Amino acid sequence: MCYSVVRPREYVHSQYVRAVANIYNREWALEYPTNSRRIMLDSSFAYQKLKTRETYAGLLKKWSTPLQKIVSADISVVYVPVVDNGHWWCVAFALKDQKIWFIDSMYTNPASEHSGDVKKLIAAVEYVLHWRDTQYNAALVWKLKQMHTWPLDSISFPDYNDNHACGIVMLMAIQESARAFTKTMQVGDINVARRALFLSHLNSDFNSCRPLLPQIVATHCPVR
């Protein structure tokens, strides 16, 4: 799975994105105050809604763990990564700004390309926000059916001449946009970016395998 990140022209594995979401959420919990949280959901949330037709109640119970014990008033952005036949993209719900952002390095107009899926994800995310607020007795409970009126925007990317790099670009854009959303993003040499992204995850204080790295390297990369 790690090799899929650093190897040129390789798709990022969904299990790797799951691990990174866990790392990002822990990093953001420390970096941003309680009333400005950034949350990245597991890609299974979108998969269950778009591919298996999971019920809203099922999404709330089984696939929205990062939103547990958090009320909507304390959230700045919710990232929902999506993978479809190896292609990664993400829809980001900026709750404070009341805006929906698309992160997709393949399409120039991702809002149009993914309009049907986003309508379903809007309904799913709003349901979860509403019922989490209700569950935790929030002072302000999220009102349903408001996101569909929000403006849509997207981050544009140059052509990297690598149709397999979508997951890399997505993870980097999520990492950067957590600080601030911008209309454009430059990644540079995509193979250099692959290695830099992987090393940032590898060296994260929230990578539970980090203390084991010397042992892992000694076992799998012996000096000859």
Image (tube, rainbow, N blue to C red):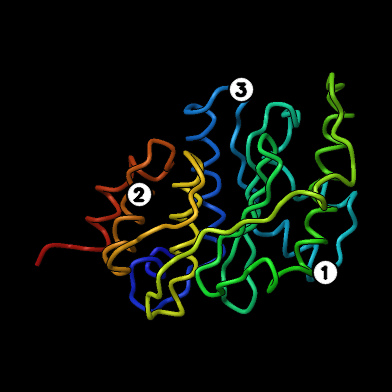
Closest to the observer: 32 or 205? 32
- In this picture, is 138 found above or below 142? above
Side of 7 where 67 appears, left or right = right
Q: Which mark is residue 97?
A: none
Left-right relation of 21 to 138: left
**Disc 3 residue type (three-letter):** Thr
Please tell me which of labels 1 and 3 falls first in the chain.
3
**Which residue position holds label 2?**
202
Q: Give the mark, 3 or 2, whose residue is nearer the N terminus.
A: 3
Q: In the image, residue 219 lies at what x, y percent?
A: 26, 59
Task: State the SS at label 1.
Answer: loop
Q: On the image, numbered disc 1 is attached to which residue?
A: 52
Res. 34 mark: 3
The answer to which quarter of the image holds residue 109 is bottom right
Q: Residue at x 29, y 48 (%)?
A: 213
Left or right, 79 with reference to 174: right
Q: Position of residue 80 (x, y in %)?
A: 66, 54
State the CA–CA distance, disc 1 to disc 3: 33 Å
Residue beneath the point at 67% across and 34% down: 96
Tell me if mark 1 has few (under 14), some (14-19) or many (20+) residues whose alpha carbon lies within 10 angstroms of its own.
few
Of the residues tagged 3 and 2, which is closer to the observer? 3
Percent across and percent down for residue 180 are 49, 41
Three-letter amino acid code at the position of disc 2: Leu
Instruction: Quadrant for residue 196, please give it.
Output: bottom left
What is the CA distance from the residue labelled 2 to the residue labelled 1? Answer: 32 Å
C-beta proximity under 8 Å, tags 1 and 3: no
The extreme left residue here reads 224
Residue at the spot 68% in from the left edge and 74% down from the top edge = 113
Residue visible at 85% across and 44% down in the picture: 146
Mark 3–mark 2 distance (CA, rounded to whole Å): 26 Å
